[in-house]
Amino acid sequence: MTEFDLIRRYFTRATPNALLGVGDDAALLKVSDDYVLAVSSDMLVSGTHFFPDADPFMLGHKTLAVNLSDMAAMGATPRWATLAIALPAADETWLERFSAGFFALAQQHGVELIGGDTTRGPLNLCVTILGEVPAQHALKRSGAQPGDEVWVSGTLGDAALALAHLQGRVALSGEALAACAQVLHQPQPRVALGLALRGIASSAIDISDGLLADLGHILDASHAAAEIDLALLPVSSVMRAYVKLPLGQKCALSGGDDYELCFTAPAVRHAEITSVSARLGLPLACIGKIVAGRGCIVHDAAGNRLNLGNGGYEHFR
């Protein structure tokens, strides 16, 4: 099978929202009037971001999901994506499963694959995603103000707990392992939430490297500080058994791969956010507030300050 056979068979689909899609030297796109283009790239490397024996269907899902999460954090509607993929070999069974997982999520969010590249090499997956957002409503990291509330979607820490299990640092079993593994391998990008937060949130970011690290990016960009209450962190029933332990706290506060949204909003928008939560059927938890200063302070249930650092995943540390 040639490179072009591979592309035609596994990665070519109709692209009705692109002027020109896969098959030429470049795609041609037209952005809607009064909208700007939001563009983000993420790379997943075998042995760094996923295990070499990862299920290809789930890996196809996650490869796109992490990019959709970036669109959610910007309040952008995802429209198009490119995929650059290095493969050790043209394994047709693997390719069929991977592309099925990728396109199942792409169809769910109306995303068209419009191009990319394939080459032989160690397994490496890189997606560039493009979306549209009204210029005045793009969510950024730099808008948090003292007095704003800090919110997170969903629950935190399950993906990190699943990874801890796979690395032998904790032993999960049965339903607990299945629930946490699902979060790690098939994260659900919060695109609908990002769209709903246009005009409400003052800043936003997706939680890919851990709550403290990613909230820290908001604080740095906004030149502000935050106070967080550990007892208010939303955790699953599985994580609840661990969150009072050092490992559980590390997973919830610094574990990566949550792909939930962390956002800030003025306190006067609290009721609107509660309504968004009910409308989307998605739990949203207010976990603290933005204050003057720098850095993030986390208090335990007794009000004591925890010495945690910023934590989070860092590739070159």
Image (cartoon, helix red, strand yellow):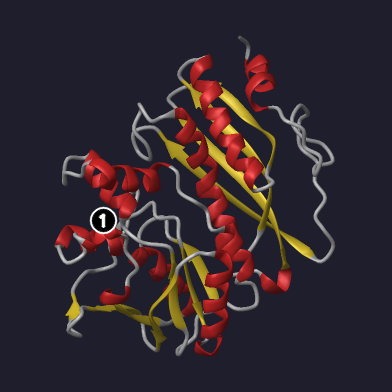
Q: Please indicate whether residue 314 sits to the left or right of residue 190 in the image.
A: left
Estimate the x, y position of residue 23 in percent, counting from the top left: 76, 26
Image coordinates of residue 155 in percent, x first then y, are 38, 62
Residue identified by numbered label 1: 238
Quadrant hosting residue 255 = bottom left
Mark yes or no: residue 244 visible: yes
Asked which quadrant contains residue 220, the reply is bottom left
Q: Residue at (32%, 64%) from the top-left corner?
A: 235
- Quadrant of the image occupied by residue 272: bottom right
**Crowding near the residue tagged with mark 1, few <14, some 14–19, many ≥20 C-alpha atoms within 10 Å:** some
- Of residues 226 and 249, the one drawn nearer to the viewer in this rendering: 249
Front residue (pair 61, 212): 61
Image: 294 above or below 155: below
Q: Is residue 317 visible?
A: no
Please state if 43 lies on the left or on the right of 131 as rendered: left
Q: Is residue 140 above or below residue 65?
A: below
Side of 216 relative to 274 (left or right): left
Task: Please name the residue shown 65% across and 77% down the image.
Answer: 199
Question: What residue lies at 46% left-to-right and 35% top-to-bottom?
Answer: 59
In the displayed structure, 306 sits above or below 182; it is below
Horizontal side of residue 139 vs 314, given as left or right:
right
Quarter the N terminus occupies: top right
- On the image, the x and y values in percent for residue 56 come to 46, 28
- Under mark 1, the amino acid is Val
